[in-house]
Amino acid sequence: MSKHMQQTSVKQTSVKVRRKFDETFKREAVQHWLQSGKSAEVIAQELGLKANRIYAWKQCFAPAAAGGGGGGGEARLAGGPARPVGRGPAREPALARAARHFKKNIGHSLRTVPERYQRIHAMKNEHSILSLCENLDVSTSGYYDWHKRLDCPGPRAVENQALAQEIDLIHAQSRHTYGSPRVMQALRKKGRRHGRRRISRLMKQKGLCGRQKGRHRVQTTDGNHDQPIAPNRLAEAPKATAPNQLWVADITYIDTVEGWLYVAGILDLYSRKIVGWAMSEHIDTSLVLKALDMALLHRTPPANLLFHSDRGVQYASGDFRQALSQASLVASMSRKGNCYDNAFMESFWSTLKLELVYRVLFLTRAQARCQIFDYIEVFYNRQRAHSALDYNSPVDFETLNN
């Protein structure tokens, strides 16, 4: 009898709870599929879903222009894809422009000996190697040794070539955002242990670099109101030891040719996962309520979860305070004019803009919505290595520790 009860207990603990998704998530998932050109199976894998859910959502939420059929995302954005920010076609490299004028080479930035050897190799058909080496202040024997290593590279050079290809692939998979620390951690997860300086050197040789944060502060908080202000309970709260203990929230805005797109987000401090978000062309209470509704549906948090935000009128409104009360959440607000009280959410907005927004020009709000959904749900939550999480993604961190 006890054995039967034990088996029943094992069966009960192994039952998986079916994940719930709100209408906003479903609509954006379908829109992302239709505009990505990928199959439903690939999109479902990126979002951690089953493909049949994507197909079912399409029947309910696909736009009329999508046509309703087909297994891949044939539809495209009406305004075309977002354009990368740039200055047009790249100029001819300095090496090619000066290859025919070796007397001008001293004025070029040939700081290292290998760079000079490369210049000599490019100009050897027009000038003698001896005169080139004299003008570039290198020895002819050194050049010939360098040329020999090109034809017959040693074991270390061969290993560097293979490592450079692997680094290039990791950098591309990170959407060209990883620097040497995250690349090093990604290699270690594959069982490859290499020094950071070596990785940094190979990245520099291939022209690869991570996205670096600069100082930038946006202003979306309207604190000029007479609504009640909650105390800053987050400052005295202990560190989160499990999901759904501490949530932080904030609003930012995204510039598009069509106008501003406002984004509200909610972040779980335990895993840094974005558990709720909403996007709209209006910055009002409805925006933050939609983000809260998504977080509550996706996470079903326990009572007394601490919900921290700034003291903006959207979070201090009666409707939002009532929603927090109905969900048994405890409100907390930053001190006036102090962005550091909500530093975790500000840091996420900075990362979003650095790795996505500042690199493209959004023609329409629909384009921005699609790419922001892809960044949050596909890349940030499920793929991006987070330094505070031992270089795991938020989803992987929660899976490993819970």
Image (cartoon, rainbow, N blue to C red):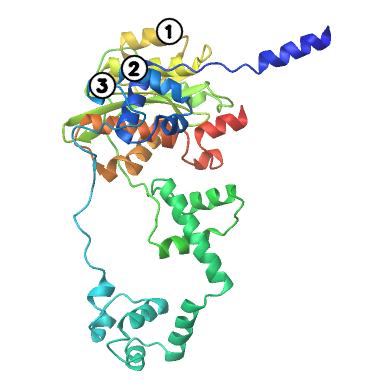
Q: Which residue is mark 1?
A: 325
Mark 1–mark 2 distance (CA, rounded to whole Å): 35 Å
Q: Quadrant of residue 264?
A: top left
Residue at image x 54%, y 24%?
A: 243
Q: Give the secondary structure at mark 2.
A: helix
Dot 1, crowdedness within 10 Å: few (<14), some or many (≥20)? Answer: some
Among the two numbered marks 3 and 1 on one chain, the one whose residue lies closer to the N terminus: 3
Q: Is residue 400 left or right of residue 76?
A: right
Check disc 3 and give the amino acid type.
Pro
Q: Tag 2: residue type?
A: Gln
Rendered view: 193 above or below 213: below
Q: CA distance from mark 3 to mark 2?
A: 9 Å
The kind of residue tagged 1 is Ser
Q: Residue furthest front?
A: 70
* Residue 105 in sight from this viewpoint: yes
Give the residue at x 20% y 58%. Answer: 89
Q: Residues within 10 Å of mark 3 (few under 14, many from 20)?
A: some
In the rendering, which numbered label is found on residue 214? none
Look at discs 3 and 1 and give the one toward the viewer: 3
Q: Compute the Cα span from label 3 to label 1.
A: 36 Å
Q: Where in the figure is residue 357, as x and y percent of width and height?
A: 29, 40
Residue nearest the observer in this picture, 101 or 273? 101
Q: Classify residue 42 as left or right of residue 156.
A: left
Residue 392 occupies quadrant: top right
Q: In the rendered image, which residue does mark 3 sit on?
A: 63
Residue marked by disc 2: 59
Residue 76 in the image, given as x and y percentages of width and height: 25, 33
Residue occupying the point 51% across, 13% down: 304
Q: Residues within 10 Å of mark 2 (few under 14, many from 20)?
A: few
Residue 351 drawn above or below residue 204: above
Q: Residue at x 35, y 12 (%)?
A: 320
Sequence order check, earlier mark of 1 and 2: 2
